[in-house]
Image (cartoon, rainbow, N blue to C red):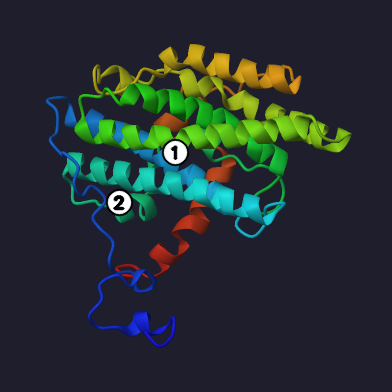
Amino acid sequence: MDNAYDGLTDAGEERHWAFGTGFTAALAGVDRAIPDVDRAALAAYCLMLGDDALVYSQRLAEWCSRAPELEEDVALANIALDLLGQARLLLTRAGEVEAAGRDEDTLAYLRDEREFRNVRLTEIDCGPGPGGDFGTTIARLLVLSTWRLALLGQLTASADPVLAAVAAKGVKELAYHRDHAAQWVLRLAGGTDVSRARMIAGLERVWPFTDELFTTHPVEAALPGVAVDPATLRAEFDQVIDTVFGAADLDRPEVRQVAPLAGQAGRDGVHTEAMGFLLAEMQHIARSTPGAVW
C-alpha cells in the first residue's frame, strides 16, 4: 500500500471493520447444543446475564472522552467493550434458545423497558451529567465486577456449553475489571480529603442496590446445574469487599437497601427512572431507522 488509507478501499479484502464487514458470528466455534431444560427459563436466564452486561456497558461508554485522564478513558472503554462482547454472546444465545426469530440486535434495540431483566445497579446514573461522578463509577465497578466475577466463576461448570464458554472467557476479563476498580478505590480513599469524601459518597450511592444482586429469582431456581444461585455468591463477595475496604480504611455504608416494588425488581422488568432515559439514548438510531443495516 502507498499509504494507510489504500487498504480501506481494496475490493479483495474482507476485513473492513470501518465498513461493518469482516465480523464473525457471535457464537462461531462454540458448542451450541441446548441442554434438556425448560427452554423458556434458559432463554430468560441468558437475557438476565446479557442485559446486565449490555446496560452496564452502555453506562461505562458514557465516560468516553470524559475520564479524568487519557489512560483511564481507554481503560473504561475497554471494560465496556468486554461487557459488550459478553452481552452479544448471551443475547444471541437467548434468541437462539427461544427460537422466536429475535437476534442480538433485536433484543438489544427493540425491546421496551419492562422487557429488560438487568439488575437495577447496572442502570442507575452516577450523578449529574454524562458519566456522572467518577467516585461513584468506581464504587459501582468494584461492586458489580466482584459480584459478576464470582457468578461467572461458578458458571464455568454450567451444563449449557455456551454459558460455560462465555464464563470461561469472562472470568479473565472480570478479574482485570475487579483489580482495576480496587486500585482506584485505594487511590481515591487514600488521596485528598475531597477524593476520599467522593469515594465514600459513591459507595453510599451504590450500596442500597447490593442486596438485589444476591436474591434468587424463580428463573434461576428452575435451572439447577445450568444457572448459578446468586445467594451462594455472598460469601465470596463479602470476603473481597472486606479486603478492599480494610486496605482502604473504609467502612461498609450504613444505608437502607432499595426494596423491590410489590415484590418485583430488575429481574422482573421493574426498573428505576434512569432506565428509560438510558434506553432512549441507546436505542435511538435503531428505532429511528427500522430495518437499517450497518
Return the residue at label 2. Answer: 104
Coordinates of residue 130 in the picture (x, y in percent) = 65, 54
C-alpha gap between disc 1 and disc 2: 21 Å
Question: Could you tell which of marks 1 and 2 lies nearer the N-terminus?
Answer: 2
Q: Is residue 270 visible?
A: no
Foreground pick, 191 / 269: 191
Q: Residues within 10 Å of mark 2 (few under 14, many from 20)?
A: many
Q: Residue at x 16, y 39 (%)?
A: 32
From the top left corner, tell me how far across and down residue 193 is, in percent. Answer: 87, 33
In the picture, the quarter occupied by the N terminus is bottom left
Horizontally, residue 236 falls left or right of residue 69, namely: left
Of the pair 79 and 256, the residue shown nearer to us: 79
**Residue named by callout 1:** 173
The three-letter code of the residue at mark 1 reads Glu
Q: Quadrant of residue 121?
A: top right
Instruction: Residue at 58%, 26% (x, y): give it.
Output: 209
Q: Judging from the image, what secondary structure is the residue with disc 1 in?
A: helix
From the image, state whether disc 1 or disc 2 is nearer to you.
Answer: 1
| Residues at discs 1 and 2 in contact (Cβ within 8 Å) | no
Residue 232 sits above or below residue 269 on the image: above
Q: Residues within 10 Å of mark 1 (few under 14, many from 20)?
A: some
Which residue is outermost to the front?
A: 2
Instruction: Say left or right for 267 vs 157.
Output: right
Image quarter (top left, top right, bottom left or bottom right) of the C terminus = bottom left
Residue 253 marker: none
Q: Position of residue 74 (x, y in %)?
A: 58, 54
In the image shown, does 202 or 177 lie closer to the viewer? 177
| Residue type, label 2 | Glu
